[in-house]
């Protein structure tokens, strides 16, 4: 079974948690897009939901496939968000933001009564940090912000390369008009401490550590999709 089939399997199981009439946060990324395709099939068969997309990319796919959408201002309280992750550990702490939508993803997840993560088994780690941590920063003073992040990380014993994300030879710009620094810290033994340190830096808009937000994870392997709850 290839990775895409595993992502589809996780998305299929997540769909069983979606109920008629739900206000649904819809994530961003390759696994979330498999969920959108399956959700669209259910909608065409009569399921009634209203979705709040976490990115312009997801909004376009939902519109193309006929999934009804609303803004978070129109639906400020959501029943459920289903989204992918770049890494997750046994406590369901996550690294997200590989698709560049971490700010909207976190806002939508926080507005939801429940967040379910869908992933293939390659995303499960013992300790977060193998995947570079995306840090969304304001363009104004972005170099000074990067230096401040490096100093804060060093105080926590974290080192490694840090680079502004590029796309097609230019700086990547998020839907919110910000830059993303991808920080290759390696193993992050204290994600809470790093989160606090990053939020203390004025130029940091958001970061990809999602702590205490996911209530359930559906992780698909070659044989089955298993459910993980926080330890």
Image (cartoon, rainbow, N blue to C red):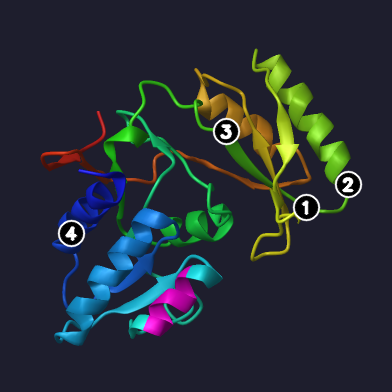
Question: Residues at badges 3 and 1 in contact (C-beta under 8 Å)?
Answer: no
Q: Image point 16% across, 78% down: which residue?
A: 20
Question: Depth check: 223 or 176 in front?
Answer: 223
Question: Residues at badges 3 and 2 in contact (C-beta under 8 Å)?
Answer: no
Label 4 vs label 1: CA separation?
A: 37 Å
Task: Report the span colored magenta.
Answer: 58-64
Q: Which mark is residue 132?
A: 3
For disc 2, the marked residue is 141
Q: Earlier in the sequence, mark 3 or mark 1?
A: 3
Q: Name the side, left or right, on which 158 lies relative to 188.
A: right
Callout 4 secondary element: helix
Callout 1 secondary element: loop
For disc 1, the marked residue is 138
Question: Residues at badges 4 and 1 in contact (C-beta under 8 Å)?
Answer: no
Q: Quadrant of residue 146?
A: top right
Label 3 vs label 1: CA separation?
A: 19 Å
Would you call the spot at circle 4 few (<14 residues within 10 Å), some (14-19), or many (20 or more)? Answer: some
Q: Earlier in the sequence, mark 3 or mark 4?
A: 4
x, y percentage for residue 202?
Answer: 78, 44
Question: Depth check: 94 or 162 in front?
Answer: 162
Question: Residues at badges 1 and 2 in contact (C-beta under 8 Å)?
Answer: yes
Mark nearest the camera among 3 and 1 is 3
x, y percentage for residue 116?
Answer: 29, 52
Mark nearest the camera among 3 and 2 is 3
Q: Image point 40% across, 83% down: which residue?
A: 64
For disc 4, the marked residue is 12
Label 1 vs label 2: CA separation?
A: 7 Å
Label 4 vs label 2: CA separation?
A: 44 Å
Q: Count the marks: how many?
A: 4
x, y percentage for residue 22?
Answer: 25, 74
Q: Name the side, left or right, on which 16 lies relative to 141.
A: left
């Amino acid at each position: 079974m290839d990775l895409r089939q595993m992502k589809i399997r996780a998305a299929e199981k997540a769909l069983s948690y979606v109920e008629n009439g739900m206000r649904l946060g819809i994530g961003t990324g390759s696994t979330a897009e498999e969920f959108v395709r399956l959700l669209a099939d259910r909608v065409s068969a009569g399921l009634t939901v209203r979705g709040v997309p976490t990115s312009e990319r997801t909004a376009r796919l939902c519109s193309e496939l006929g999934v009804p959408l609303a803004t978070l201002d129109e639906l400020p309280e959501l029943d459920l968000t289903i989204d992918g992750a770049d890494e997750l550990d046994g406590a369901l702490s996550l690294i997200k933001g590989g698709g560049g939508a971490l700010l909207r993803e976190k806002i939508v997840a926080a507005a939801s009564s429940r967040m379910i993560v869908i992933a293939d088994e390659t995303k499960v780690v013992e300790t977060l940090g193998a995947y570079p941590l995306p840090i969304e920063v304001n363009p104004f003073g972005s170099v000074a912000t990067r230096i401040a992040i490096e100093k804060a990380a060093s105080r926590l014993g974290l080192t490694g390369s840090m680079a502004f994300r590029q796309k097609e030879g230019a700086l990547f710009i998020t839907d919110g008009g910000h830059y993303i620094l991808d920080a290759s810290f390696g193993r992050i033994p204290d994600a809470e401490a790093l989160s606090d340190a990053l939020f203390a830096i004025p130029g940091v808009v958001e970061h990809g550590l999602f702590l205490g937000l996911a209530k359930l994870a559906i992780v698909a392997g070659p044989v089955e999709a298993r459910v993980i709850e926080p330890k």
